[in-house]
């Protein structure tokens, strides 16, 4: 019996070496950890249960039968993050460059199926060279099996993809269908076709970083929701991130102990809004002062910075925040901001996470670039996303709420439950200058008259009270009591029940 046990231990140790010492060293020289080291950092110590460590590929062409490595390029299993179950697969770049074979795909789909059955989040760590070239269509079929499961699980369990090395060809489309993608700066890149193919087809010469590094995907393409400096920082941030997420769509948000009093008043908020309505202020300060312990996990911080999205907690429970950022483009809504916020709102709604919206928006960004870039459809995405929400929606207008953007940013009319305004709020079809220039065009030559008309417009429209008189604003609140008021609203809304008409699915303006 002893020798049987020893043999098992030997086989396990062999499998754990993956592609061998040399390739592990090469991985480290590139500043990357191995698949198992990454899992070790992501999960609670000692919690990882590995499956299928002895699976090998079944290919025989191009000499494939002479090189079989247990595990076949992906490490799979489950464990816990701060005590909560998560399923994991991590591509092992030391084994055939982490490329996907038929057997490799079967390991992944087994874990995807288990995560869905167990209703627990799944996290994929990517570092891979795409389809296993020696396997041909069997590898392509494997990708199809993985993609289909991504879609089946979408909206049921959170799916997170972390790109920690190359991620090309078939490997990019599975992450693209998950809820969140995070990248590691300088060591990871994602593209459908690599620099060599690009050069052959288009004559364009680019580096992998220029084509698909974190600098592209976290700032311009919005493929990635965030980027981190190295493997260790990235995985530790993933642990923090998972703590915000429900286990599945029916689980409700996780509740963590909070030592931050929900009654906490924040006098500094009374002076957050500058006297000059055209002067910016940092909306992130408001979010950080409202959430428990100032802990805000921002998503896509480098993309469409004119809108803020991310998770925080109030009374220990996760809340999704969407907020215009007056520091960038005066907080205007453009195509990118609308798309960014719409996707976030839809994630929150799918997973029953209440949404708090802070509004300071001068309107939609005018111009040919925006119109030809599909601002109508993109703005409609956000409008659609909020309008289909059944989760609690609490909205606070801090300053400007002009025109269509007022309605889009979770106004009462599209389903918000509790709508607050600070006394500094200005709710109108447009700002005073634009309004007066249109309504009193014939007086434009008379500056005195225009000033008079502007003052008249400001005093009658540029306040929250016209909206409050109609009940579109439930209450004009003191800025210092914002946390308390939002906490109370969310607490009242915990039992909110709202059903949309039954349908196969909606037709979101894509
Ligand atoms: C088999 C592969 C492989 C692959 C890498 N390897 N990619 N083996 N199939 N796709 C192996 C290499 O032979 C090598 O083995 C080891 O992995 C490390 O690869 P290197 O090239 O030495 O590493 P590096 O220089 O870091 O380059 C990494 C790389 C490059 C950029 C990923 O390997 C590469 O370009 N690979 C091919 C990418 C690709 O075109 N894949 C197919 C995409 S098409 P040894 O034994 O030397 O360690 C696709 C279609 C799916 O995926 C569509 C589904 C819808």
Image (tube, grey):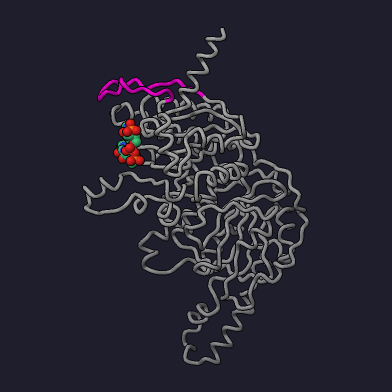
Residue at 56% over, 38% down: 42
- Which residue: 66% across, 69% down? 272
Residue 133 or residue 499, whichever sits in front: 133
Residue 269 percent coordinates (x, y): 70, 67
Kindly identify the residue that appears in the image at 56 percent across and 26 percent down.
49
What is the tally of numbered marks visible in this picture?
A: 0
- Decide which of 501, 69 is in the foreground and name it: 69
Q: Please, is residue 211 above or below residue 358 in the view?
A: above
Judge by depth and name the residue closer to the eye, 69 or 406: 69
- Majority secondary structure of magenta residues: loop
Magenta stretch: includes residue 52: yes
Please provide percent x and percent y for residue 60: 28, 20
- Left or right of 176 on screen, residue 208: left
**Residue 434 drawn above or below residue 124:** below
Q: Residue furthest top?
A: 1
Q: Which residues lie in the magenta part? A: 51-71
Is 510 left or right of 331, judged from the image as shown? left
Residue 56, position as x, y percentages in the image: 39, 21
Q: Is residue 53 magenta?
A: yes
The image shows residue 121, relative to residue 201, as above or below, that is: above
* Image quarter hosting the N terminus: top right
Q: Is residue 131 visible?
A: no
Looking at the image, is 248 positioned above or below residue 443?
Answer: above
* Picture quadrant of residue 349: top right
298 displayed left or right of 373 = right
Q: Quadrant of residue 411?
A: bottom right
Decide if residue 443 is in sight here. Answer: yes
Q: Residue at x 61, y 39 (%)?
A: 246
**In x, y percent, where is residue 226?**
50, 51
Q: Quadrant of ligand 1?
A: top left
């Amino acid at each position: 019996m002893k020798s049987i046990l020893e043999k098992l231990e030997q086989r396990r140790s062999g499998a754990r070496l993956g592609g061998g010492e040399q390739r592990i060293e090469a991985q480290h020289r590139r500043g990357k950890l191995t698949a198992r080291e990454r899992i070790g950092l992501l999960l609670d110590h000692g919690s990882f249960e590995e499956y299928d460590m002895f699976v090998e590929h079944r290919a025989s062409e191009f000499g494939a039968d002479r090189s079989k490595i247990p595990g076949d390029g992906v490490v799979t299993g489950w464990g816990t993050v701060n005590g909560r179950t998560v399923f994991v697969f991590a591509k092992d770049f030391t084994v055939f460059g982490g490329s996907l074979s038929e057997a490799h795909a079967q390991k992944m789909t087994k874990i995807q199926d288990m995560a869905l059955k167990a209703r627990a989040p799944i996290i994929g760590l990517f570092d891979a060279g795409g389809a296993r070239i020696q396997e041909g269509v069997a590898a392509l079929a494997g990708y199809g099996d993985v993609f289909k499961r991504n879609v089946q699980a979408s909206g049921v369990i959170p799916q997170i993809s972390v790109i920690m090395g190359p991620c090309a060809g078939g490997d990019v489309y599975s992450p693209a269908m998950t809820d969140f993608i995070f990248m590691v700066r300088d060591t990871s890149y994602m593209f459908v076709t690599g620099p060599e193919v690009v050069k052959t087809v288009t004559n364009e010469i680019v580096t992998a970083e220029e084509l698909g590094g974190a600098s592209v995907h976290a700032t311009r393409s919005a493929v990635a929701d965030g980027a981190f400096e190295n493997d260790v920082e990235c995985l530790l941030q993933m642990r923090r991130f998972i703590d915000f997420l429900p286990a599945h769509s029916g689980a409700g948000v996780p509740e963590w102990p909070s030592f931050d009093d929900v009654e906490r008043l924040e006098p500094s908020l009374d002076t957050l809004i500058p006297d000059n309505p055209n002067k910016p202020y940092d909306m992130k300060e408001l979010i950080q002062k409202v959430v428990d312990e100032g802990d805000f996990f921002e998503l896509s911080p480098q993309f469409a910075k004119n809108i803020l999205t991310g998770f925080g907690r109030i009374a220990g429970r996760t809340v999704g925040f969407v907020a215009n950022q007056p520091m960038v483009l005066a907080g205007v809504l453009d195509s990118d901001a609308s798309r960014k916020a719409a996707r976030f709102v839809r994630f929150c709604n799918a997973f029953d996470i209440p949404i708090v919206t802070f509004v300071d928006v001068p309107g939609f960004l005018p111009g040919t670039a925006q119109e030809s870039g599909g601002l109508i459809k993109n703005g409609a995405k956000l409008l659609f996303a909020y309008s289909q929400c059944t989760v609690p929606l609490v909205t606070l207008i801090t300053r400007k709420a002009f025109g269509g953007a007022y309605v889009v940013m979770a106004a009462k009319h599209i389903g918000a439950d509790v709508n607050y305004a600070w006394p500094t709020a200005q709710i109108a079809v447009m700002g005073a200058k634009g309004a007066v220039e249109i309504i009193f065009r014939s007086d434009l030559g008379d500056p005195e008259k225009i000033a008079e008309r502007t003052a008249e417009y400001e005093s009658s429209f540029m306040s929250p009270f016209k909206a409050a008189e109609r009940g579109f604003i439930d209450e004009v609140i003191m800025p210092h009591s914002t946390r308390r008021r939002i906490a109370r609203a969310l607490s009242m809304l915990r039992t909110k029940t709202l059903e949309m008409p039954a349908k196969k699915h909606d037709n979101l303006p894509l």
